[in-house]
Image (tube, helix red, strand yellow):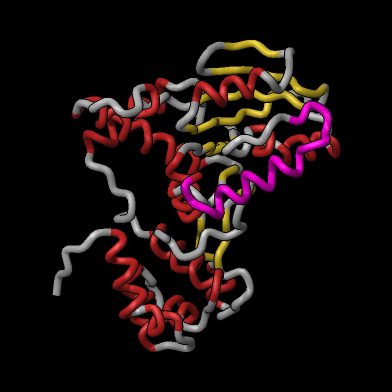
Amino acid sequence: RVFPIGGDEIHNFFESNFKEQMLQRPSPSAYEWALRLGATEPHEAELFAQLEGETMWDYLGALLMRSEEVLHLQSDIAKDVAKLMKSRELNTRLPYDAIDVRRGDAILDRTDAQNFAINYWDAQQGKPGAKESQNYIPLIHYLRHYYDQSEEKCNKGDKVVNISTNAPGAVRKEIFALSKNRWGNDDVVRVRPKQCLAFKFVISTPRKRDVSPGMDASCTDRYDDLVADIADFITMQKANTFVGEFHSDWGRLVRTSRLMLNKAAIEASSHNNPVLLKDMNVAWGYSHPGPPGW
């Protein structure tokens, strides 16, 4: 049977028809589910049929991402994505990190996200240089682990960080505010906020939908934005360290794309660390995204 339904309807359909069946453990149905999702060996499906909670969802995500069908680009689109990535100031063959900064109503209309933002700014009150409460989490908070690391180990070389954002103008201002010791242009900014900490920020290609919000976009503009979105996704997926959050679809998708099955643990039928996550720092909010696609 085929059900032509949208995203919200799929969520509701799963909740009402399959949720209890899929979450029951141990479960013969989960074994079959794992095989359909890409388990290639019986012991991979057998372990999935026993897992629960966050580990189960991560295992499911790792199975999905191992399949080449999850993100399979048409040849012309793949060429345009590769061309855009090559034209950027970021050399992806050298070590780099990636930060995803999402802002706007799509995230902050959610009450839980609003509460995290309110709590953050409330905690800043009384500190030197504290600003009035804003409806977002500032870039400096995404960078806090770099500041912590600089206290432990002095590195005077540039930390290369790609920033993907739907608010490039605002983020650029926050980069400039990190230190007067800075130089660069709109796309690449070098900043040294501390003697033992220096950044080379590469800011992703601005989207036409973000530069001119509310205006009707042409098919060409939509295509260009799509190519830039895919290029950003690949950049974040391959980064040494990814910094993001799970209130945006991007943050959840990128985390899922960085999951890998731990072959040794699975072959040993171990429930301890059957899934590996390439290095990630959660900037704010929930520490786990929940089920893939939620």
The residue located at (72%, 24%) in the rendering is 198
Residue 283 seen anywhere in this rendered image of the structure? no
Residue 83 occupies which quadrant of the picture? top left
Is residue 292 left or right of 188 when viewed as pictured? left
The answer to which of 244 and 280 lies nearer the viewer is 244
Residue 25, given in percent of the width and then of the height, sits at: 48, 87
Q: Is 284 above or below relative to 216?
A: below
Say if the magenta span includes residue 97.
Answer: no
- Highlighted range, magenta: 109-130
Horizontal arrangement in the rendering, residue 102 relative to residue 131 (left or right)? left
Q: Residue at x 50, y 38 (%)?
A: 102
Say if 289 sits above or below 169 in the image. below
* Residue plotted at (34% across, 23% down): 212
Determine the residue located farthest toward the front in the rendered image.
Answer: 132
Examine the rendering and report whether any part of residue 130 can be seen: yes
Q: Front-most of 167 and 28?
A: 167
Q: Quadrant of the N terminus?
A: bottom left
Q: Is residue 282 left or right of residue 292?
A: right
- Residue 267: where, in percent of width, then height? 53, 76
